Image (spheres, rainbow, N blue to C red):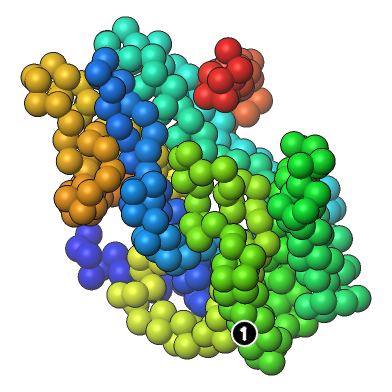
Amino acid sequence: MTLAGTIAKIETRTPAHRDRAIDGLRALALLAVPTGHWLLGGFTLDSGGALHNASPLSAFGGFAPVSWVLQMLGIFFLVGGYASVLSYRRRTSTTAAWLRQRVVRLGRPVLGVTAVWAALIPVLYALGVPATTLHTGSTLVIQPLWFVGVYTVVTALTPYCVRAAHTLGAWAAVPLLTTVAIVDFLRYGPYADTMPSWLSMVNILPGWLFAYQLGVSWGEGRIGRRGARVLLIGGTLLFAALLVVFHYPASMVGVPGEARTNSHPPSLLVLALAAAQSGAAILLRDRIGRLLKKPALWAPVVVINLSAMTILCWHQTAMLAAAVPGSLLGTATGLGTLPGLTATPDSLVWIAARLAWMPLFAVLLVLIGRYARRFDGPWASGTRTTKARRAAAGLLAAGFAVFALGLA
């Protein structure tokens, strides 16, 4: 089928009631994940030919605003909350069954990628890939999967978010913002030295639930254009104040060697950005929806949304599929490091070269996705063989997690 035919087919199969703006926002947030990891993540190659994680932000702190644009998890949680409300309303079974269906749909791809990597590690090691490189790669693969776990927990809270939205409207998100602000004050304020190290972990749930709750309130019709303007202006002002007055780290992603990070767990700066992004998204919704009435623009949005879990789970593997062979080639041939791939990310040459590598990463992700998407759909059930395969996949995934987290 020709490209034009595919576009026409997608347009024909799109229901008239489909909210194209929500899908467009989700696709934008999805694409920001691999773009951010590929652009702001790099490697160094040691004398033994092993790869270590690095970031151009260590050398170019002035590039931190790029992370403000690419950190779009606030948008993802916003549209996730909005879509969950619609799905929750249309459920034809119990709430427990609805949650179980959504959790299983999120868990299958994660189980797939971790099981595959667990099987690959001994093979790659036997082929000469250094153990340090394998551990570096494993941490990169598991890094975006935390999002799936948090999103699963947040999704399970949907019924409570709906009740809060009915009662408080947009104000339902304020206690979450306040909780993160209090924790930040305790861990960064005058009493920081007396606070336990685990305190920051308290921010994980309210930090990511904040935008989701906004999405639920939006889906329930409790946030209009006036509320969106308050979110946009208030979030922007709070963001600026936290940077200028309270000296929060400018980068929205972790920078190797830095003592503080905004994203793991989320700081108040992340919520301020999410509020501003949410306000902008709500205000631009109608305009985005009209724009996506064009079949040529709508078709890629559909493809991206259908490949959501594949993109999240496998984009780091796509980058490693280029970097690991590159490191072996450089070591074996004496070429050393490859700019933009295995060279230290500390120069403008590296940035230009990385931009040139990114189309290859995208092609590798598409090729990997052709096979990896089978993990997204329902797995066969009912036979002893299938149950044994599931158990084996679970054991492999658990072993990979232990290895990636450095627990063994």
Farthest residue in the front direction?
190
Could you tell me which residue is drawn at 62 percent across and 70 percent down? 245
Image: 137 above or below 62: above
Q: Is residue 286 left or right of residue 57?
A: right
Q: Nearer the viewer, residue 10 or 174?
A: 174
User: Which SS class for mark 1?
Assistant: helix
Q: Mark 1 sits on what residue? A: 233
Residue type, label 1: Ile
Image quadrant holding the C terminus, namely top right
Q: Locate residue 164, reporting x and y percent.
A: 87, 69
The vertical placement of 8 against 200, above or below, is below
Residue with the most extreme bottom position: 226
Q: Nearer the viewer, residue 214 or 342?
A: 342
Residue 400 lies, in percent from the top left, at 53, 21
Q: Quadrant of the N terminus?
A: bottom left
Tell me the residue at 88%/68% (across/down).
163
401 or 54: nearer the viewer: 54
239 or 28: nearer the viewer: 239
Where is residue 84? Give x, y as percent: 69, 63
